[in-house]
Amino acid sequence: MTNAESSRRGFLTFLADLLMAAIALIVAVPAVGYLLAPLRRKAGADDGATAFLDAGPLADFPVGQWRLGALEVVQEDGWKKTRVRHSIWVLRASPVASSPGEPTQGITVLSTICPHLGCPINWHPDPSEFICPCHGGVFSKEGRHTSGPPPRNMDPLEFEVRDGRLWVRWQDFKIGVAERIPVSV
């Protein structure tokens, strides 16, 4: 009987040790993952604030007309992802080549955010000018400041044309100052 009790006791000790090891592993894996998370960031990966974002096919932006477009920026804060939509003004002055290495002149992409206080700027085709409804800032059809309190021209945005689609790099700029100062998110 001692032999049977000893083997039963040894088996139960083995099961208890195995259960404790499994619990320790379940607790340790997330803790180690949390500590090593900064090292897992992919090298060269663009975050949502600096990546080029798809603004749509060039065909959506008629030649010779300002057209309002939209960009969706995904911002990550730990495990939380937030989608933020930003508007852009796009003008195609002439047909544009979309092959790599070919010029993309003739496209202008402007932020809709007023450099005065951050209000949305609207296009008014009748007088052919941009107007900020908050404090009466007026910009020419090229986005140059013509009157009102804004301290500088509308902010241009960097863009690329890839396979017939417009890709825009969204950038926030400091408002209320005469210099165009990028703001990192």
Image: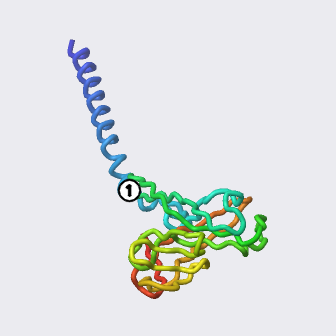
Residue 31 percent across, percent down from the top left: 33, 51
Q: Closest to the observer: 33 or 53?
A: 53
Q: Residue at x 55, y 70 (%)?
A: 124
Q: Would you place residue 87 above or below residue 31 in this image?
A: below
Which corner quadrant of the image does residue 116 belong to?
bottom left
Please state the horizontal and vertical placement of residue 103, each as a whole percent of the image: 76, 74
Tell which residue pokes out farthest to the top in this image: 1
Residue 174 vs residue 65: left or right? left
Q: Residue at x 61, y 79 (%)?
A: 142
Q: Position of 180 compared to 98: left or right?
A: left
Residue at 33% x, 40% y is: 26
At 45% from the left and 55% from the top, the residue drawn is 83
Q: Quadrant of the N terminus?
A: top left
Tell me where residue 72 appears, x and y as whole percent. Answer: 51, 57
The residue furthest bottom is 178
Q: Residue 143 appears at what percent x and percent y?
A: 57, 79
For label 1, the residue is: 78
Kindly state the secondary structure of the residue where label 1 is placed: loop
What colour scheme has been applied to the protein in the rendered image? Answer: rainbow
The mark total stands at 1
Q: In the picture, which quadrant includes the C terminus?
A: bottom left
- Dot 1, crowdedness within 10 Å: few (<14), some or many (≥20)? few
Q: Is residue 140 left or right of residue 38?
A: right
* Kind of residue at disc 1: Gly
Say above or below: 6 vs 42.
above
Check the image and name the residue furthest to the front.
Answer: 126
Q: Is residue 102 left or right of residue 92?
A: right
Q: Quadrant of residue 137?
A: bottom left
